[in-house]
């Protein structure tokens, strides 16, 4: 289908030549599909492909050299795209039923890529500024991903594999990044940051995990990794050059990290198991200084 849409764009460009007009190719195969396109400005390009039943697309472009490409393969999918400014681009691909994708971009050189495979998934991307980037990829059912960026050179990556996962990313400033990766069911990840050069990484493998990361300031970093079920991680940073690394392995761990000030660091590891901690009383026969008669260790 990508090749079909690309070929249509090439044919249209040859036909039109170098005219400074807006361009549109809309193709529908099936029944009761609808597409509404509104273009104002010059050299904006739009391509829509719908294959199925009752798919809906609404595209509005204002400005210069904005590009949109959307594809819906299935039934009752919905795409909404609004671009205002210069050289913004959006690429949305849906395969399944009743998926929903929304892109809104204001500024210059912003880019959104959205991929949905399954049923009843939802993605929302909002960018206001210049050179921002959002990537959203969903495989499964009933997943929801929301990304909002204000400023310049910010980046969000959201990947969901499974069912019923929720991911929210919000950032305001410059050169910030949020990476959210969910594999499993019913996981929740929220990342929020304000400042410059901040970074949030949230990785969840399992079910019903919850991660919340909030940063205010510059050059802060939070990494939350959850591998198991029903783990909870909450982290807050207010200042500059702070760093938190959390890894939870197993089930039902909880962590709360708070940093207020500058240049603080936390490294947290939680694991479910029956380990005795390597106590010296269970060590081999060789003498251990910690087990001496004056150690007070009770060995």
Image (cartoon, rainbow, N blue to C red):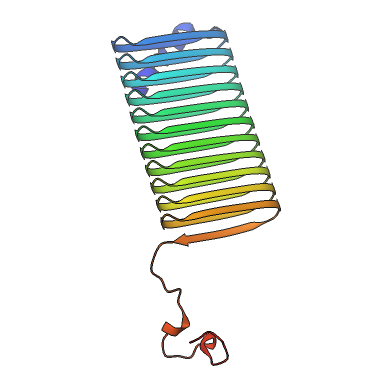
Is residue 14 visible in the rendered image? The answer is: no
Residue 188, visible in the rendered structure: yes
Q: Is residue 125 above or below residue 197?
A: above
Question: Of all residues shown, which one is farthest toward the bottom?
Answer: 293
In the rendered image, the vertical position of residue 212 relative to residue 62, given as above or below: below
Q: Position of residue 13 (x, y in %)?
A: 46, 12
Residue 171 in the figure: left or right of residue 164: right
Question: Would residue 196 be found to the left or right of residue 255 on screen?
Answer: right
* 17 and 167: which is toward the camera: 167
Q: Residue at x 55, y 40 (%)?
A: 191
Q: Quadrant of the N terminus?
A: top left
Percent coordinates x, y for residue 214 in the rendering: 60, 43
Residue drawn 39% across and 41% down? 186
Residue 36: image location, x then y, percent = 44, 9
Residue 190 screen position, x and y as percent: 52, 40
- The image quarter in which residue 155 lies: top right
Number of marks: 0
Q: Nearer the viewer, residue 296 or 260?
A: 296
What is the quadrant of residue 30 in the picture? top left
Q: Residue at x 47, y 60 (%)?
A: 270
> Which residue is drawn at the image coordinates 45% and 28% (left, top)?
123
Would you say 219 lies left or right of 166 here? Answer: right
């Amino acid at each position: 289908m990508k090749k079909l849409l690309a070929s249509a764009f090439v044919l249209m460009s040859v036909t039109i030549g170098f005219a400074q007009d807006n361009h549109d190719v809309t193709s529908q195969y099936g029944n009761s599909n609808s597409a509404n396109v509104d273009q104002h400005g010059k050299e904006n390009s739009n391509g829509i492909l719908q294959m199925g039943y009752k798919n809906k697309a609404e595209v509005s472009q204002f400005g210069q050299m904005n590009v949109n490409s959307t594809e819906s393969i299935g039934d009752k999918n919905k795409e909404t795209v609004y671009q205002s400014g210069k050289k913004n681009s959006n690429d949305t691909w849906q395969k399944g039923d009743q998926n929903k994708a929304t892109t809104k971009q204001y500024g210059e050189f912003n880019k959104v890529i959205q991929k949905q495979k399954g049923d009843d998934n939802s993605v929302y991307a909002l960018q206001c500024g210049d050179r921002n980037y959002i990537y959203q990829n969903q495989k499964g059912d009933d997943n929801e991903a929301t990304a909002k960026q204000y400023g310049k050179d910010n980046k969000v990556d959201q990947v969901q594999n499974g069912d019923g996962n929720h991911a929210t990313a919000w950032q305001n400033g410059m050169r910030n990044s949020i990476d959210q990766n969910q594999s499993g069911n019913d996981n929740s990840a929220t990342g929020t940051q304000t400042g410059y050069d901040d970074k949030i990484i949230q990785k969840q493998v399992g079910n019903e995990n919850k991660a919340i990361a909030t940063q205010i300031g510059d050059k802060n970093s939070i990494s939350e990794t959850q591998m198991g079920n029903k783990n909870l991680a909450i982290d807050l940073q207010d200042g500059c050059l702070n760093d938190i690394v959390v890894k939870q392995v197993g089930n039902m761990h909880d962590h709360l990290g708070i940093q207020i000030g500058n240049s603080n660091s936390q490294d947290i590891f939680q694991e479910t198991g029956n380990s005795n901690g390597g106590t010296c009383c269970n060590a081999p026969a060789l003498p251990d200084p910690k087990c001496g008669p004056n150690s007070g260790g009770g060995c």
